[in-house]
Amino acid sequence: MASFYQDKVAIVTGASSGIGKQTSLLLASKGTHVVALARRKKLLDELAGQIKSGGGQCTVFVCDVTDREAVARTAKKIRTKYKAVDFLVNNAGYGRANSVLEESEEQIRALMETSYFGMIYMLKEFLPGMVERGQGSVANLGSIVSELVFPYFGPYSAAKFAVAALTESLHLEMKGSGIKISLILPGPADTAFFDDISWQDKRTVFPRVKPQEVAKTIVKALRTGKLVNFCPSYLIPVVWSYNAYGPISRKIVGVVGQPKGSTLARLLGRKT
Ligand SMILES: NC(=O)c1ccc[n+]([C@@H]2O[C@H](COP(=O)([O-])OP(=O)(O)OC[C@H]3O[C@@H](n4cnc5c(N)ncnc54)[C@H](OP(=O)(O)O)[C@@H]3O)[C@@H](O)[C@H]2O)c1
């Protein structure tokens, strides 16, 4: 019997690195034709080479998801080439660990343009086709910071809250339509995400998960259509407790989220 993923077409944004790359490799290994989008052509070509050498299928398109015209042009090419898109993984994004006071307005807007509007543009291009056919799956990348608010994460967290809110609303709207809409909420994952300079004096409270694990969560969600998908799953009780003990949780997060070397961190005797 053919698997759920066999011979389907999946668009993965941000496929050149990290979680998007691992999701592309995993889908391709299951017989899905991967349509990989990102800005860095060289990395996309390497991904396509890796998939094809393993017997899989992959087509790449250089596309900046913040550029509405580029998304429209790319979408037109994809629609011409494939009769239907079955899966859409809105993964393109990046994070900066800075306060609103440290970030310029341009930097704050860019975070929102990539994670939130990038997702909106892709949905506008591909969701109507899914609705018309009465089938399809969408996975949107939120983050643990879509659920827990840490100090020095305001602008990034706000962009991921926006992704979460839109996804939940759409999930409810699509009930009974045959379209599955899922939100993926990874904790810190071991990717190039943390190369950004803003992370140098920040700590991640939770241990880092492998991007391959997040990819498994995404691929499973495309099949189940479950709304909320944490990775790793120990984040479920963490978020539950955070919400159940609101004021106390926020005090704890306020302390553990202080930058390295801050007065509070020094008073607590922390070296890192
Ligand atoms: N790593 C974590 O701890 C973590 C935790 C929670 C959520 N997330 C989310 O997971 C997603 C993937 O992050 P990652 O950890 O895999 O980081 P990564 O390794 O840095 O990958 C980010 C990907 O997004 C692409 N991208 C960024 N801006 C883009 C744009 N304007 N247009 C098209 N593609 C763009 C990058 O490709 P190009 O540069 O080639 O365009 C790259 O392929 C992001 O949405 C991130 O917010 C990550």
Image: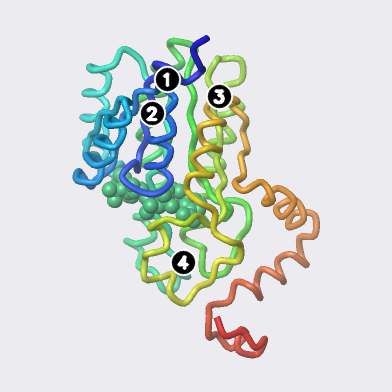
The quadrant of the picture occupied by the C terminus is bottom right
Pointer 2 with pointer 1, Cβ within 8 A: no
Binning the other alpha carbons within 10 Å of mark 4 as few (below 14), some (14 to 19) or many (20 upward) gives many
User: Does the rendering let one see residue 164?
Assistant: yes
**Which badge, 2 or 4, comes first in the chain's sequence?**
2
Real-space Cα separation, disc 3 to disc 1, in angstroms: 11 Å
Label 4, label 3: how far apart the Cα atoms are? 33 Å
Q: Circle 1 sits in a helix, a strand or a loop, which is it?
A: loop
Question: Does dot 3 land on a helix, a strand or a loop?
Answer: helix
Q: Nearer the viewer, mark 2 or mark 3?
A: 2
How far apart, in angstroms, are the residues tagged by discs 2 and 4? Answer: 33 Å
Callout 4 amino acid: Ala
Q: Which mark is residue 86?
A: 1
Task: Name the amino acid, label 2.
Answer: Ala
Find numbered disc 2 in the image and state the secondary structure of the residue it sits on. Answer: helix
Q: Which residue is mark 3?
A: 223
Residue depth check, mark 2 versus mark 4: number of the one nearer the observer: 2
Asked whether, in this view, residue 272 is left or right of residue 128, the answer is right
In which quadrant of the rendered view does residue 241 lie? Answer: bottom right
**Which disc number belongs to residue 28?**
2
Q: Nearer the viewer, residue 159 or 31?
A: 31
The picture places residue 5, in percent across and down from the top left corner, at 47, 21
Check disc 1 and give the amino acid type: Asp
